Image: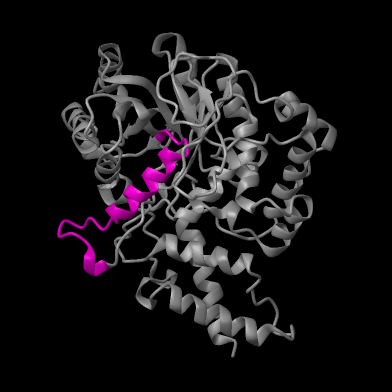
Amino acid sequence: MKNIDRRDFLKRIGAAGAVVGATTTLAACAGGKGSEAVTEAITGNAVNSGEKPIGDMTYRTNRRGDDKVSLLGYGCMRWPTVSRGKALPDGNDIDQEQVNRLVDYAIEHGVNYFDSSPVYCKGFSERATGIALKRHPRESYFIATKLSNFAEQLHSREASIQMYRNSFKELQVDYIDYYLLHSVGGGGMDNFSKRYLNNGMLDFLLEQREKGAIRNLGFSFHGDVEVFDWLLANDDKYHWDFVQIQMNYVDWLHAAEQNKRNVNAEYLYGELQKRGIPAVIMEPLLGGRLSKLPVHVVNHLKERRPDMSVASWAFRFCGTYPGVMCALSGMTYMEHLQDNLRSFCPLDPLTEEDLAYLEDTAQNILTYPTVPCNDCNYCMPCPYGINIPAIFVHYNKLVNEGVVPKDAQDPNYRDLRRKYLISFDRAVPAIRQADHCIGCGQCAPHCPQNIKIPQQLRRISARIEELRQNL
């Protein structure tokens, strides 16, 4: 692994580790649409009766300075689900009662940014999010959603406008606070042109912003940096209100090392900073991977801050940079929400020494042979029934736990081999395992992380077969 010089690294992070910036606002209520652009502290956080207060939420202002956005945003991609027998006939298996509880708790503790999409949760995220938020005053939260017209049949102007209109219906709103062109960059400029330029959809969305149906317009980026650079080069024309990027302490300097098609977050963030465009952060935990680290890495972080959760390191990393308006987290369980609130209520920025420590941690993480899967499920469904995310997630779990049989001469080999094979069979049914992959490649173009999915499946399948034969 290539090591970056410590002195050079500290120069590159500059003052970001020491100063959060004048756009930070500490508040105890859900921000609303205040006009304050200066730092202020308001006490008296509302909490449930008898519940210990978590603290004061940290807020940042948007580009115009008319929104105070909670630094912790709720990613609505992973809402809790009910058991199969309780799912609705249309396939909606979201546990609406639990969603309501999570949203209530989040708003009560200062979270006011909720990020959804027409394609999240098998197409039911917007509906569940809208039902939960409708129970609260409209001015107490900001809704973000996206034009997720990935499929070729959705590239037409009519289909894209229908998707746009349907978001208002599902979310039960008459305006959307933050609207995004979803995951631009995949497929390069050709694909971007088909989705947004040739059909006139970008012009349409600009008109909708002018009319007030969209309050802030931006885009989320994965993939070809040419698209990112082109959109920012035309900021004088489009006036992007915000941009959503993948940023965490591994991808900050090492995204391109993992896959040459990926772009280091340091570059993406830096280009936004040059233009004064706020960044919304997705994948601060790399799809949860930075909260499920190898034991040795966990111990490394605990040595420095034994009182801090592993996940909080990643969230504090994002919040330390003053150009970050909001960091998203897909919080499925109440304990996730509560732990994340502790990272931002209020934010305790990392020092330069902390950031350097995280860079050492990132380099350590990259020595483990995990698959960079964020469990987004964009690769699904597989036409051959393979549960691709489940295979990758469970493989990574075994690597992190050290259940990796290496050599038959190892005295623990037989025990590790048995645990490895039994664990895989219990986690993923045999008919959905990697050995059923025929290499059609249908999944790979949809992966935001640019994983060579068939190759990774073959690698895992070959290892499992080798262990089964090596009795």
The quarter of the picture where residue 389 lies is: bottom left
Question: In this orientation, does residue 441 appear?
Answer: yes
Which quadrant, please, contains the C terminus?
bottom right
Q: Which residue occupies 41% across, 61% down?
A: 388
Residue 77 appears left or right of 343:
left
Answer above or below: position of 454 versus 134: below
Q: State the residue in front, 332 or 426.
A: 332
| In the image, residue 268 lies in the stretch drawn in magenta | no
Q: How far from the left and from the top, in percent, is residue 7?
A: 84, 32
The quarter of the picture where residue 437 lies is: bottom left
Q: How far from the left and from the top, in percent, is residue 452?
A: 49, 53
Residue 377 appears left or right of 339:
left
Answer above or below: position of 370 versus 111: below
Answer above or below: position of 204 versus 350: above
Answer above or below: position of 437 versus 4: below
Question: In this orientation, does residue 180 appear?
Answer: no
Residue 335 appears left or right of 189:
right
Q: How far from the left and from the top, in percent, is residue 49?
A: 44, 47
Q: State the residue in front, 419 or 37.
A: 37
Residue placed farthest to the top in the image? Answer: 236
Q: Which residue occupies 29% across, 11% down?
A: 210
Tally the marks. Answer: 0
Residue extent of the magenta highlight: 84-113
Q: How is the image coloured?
A: one colour
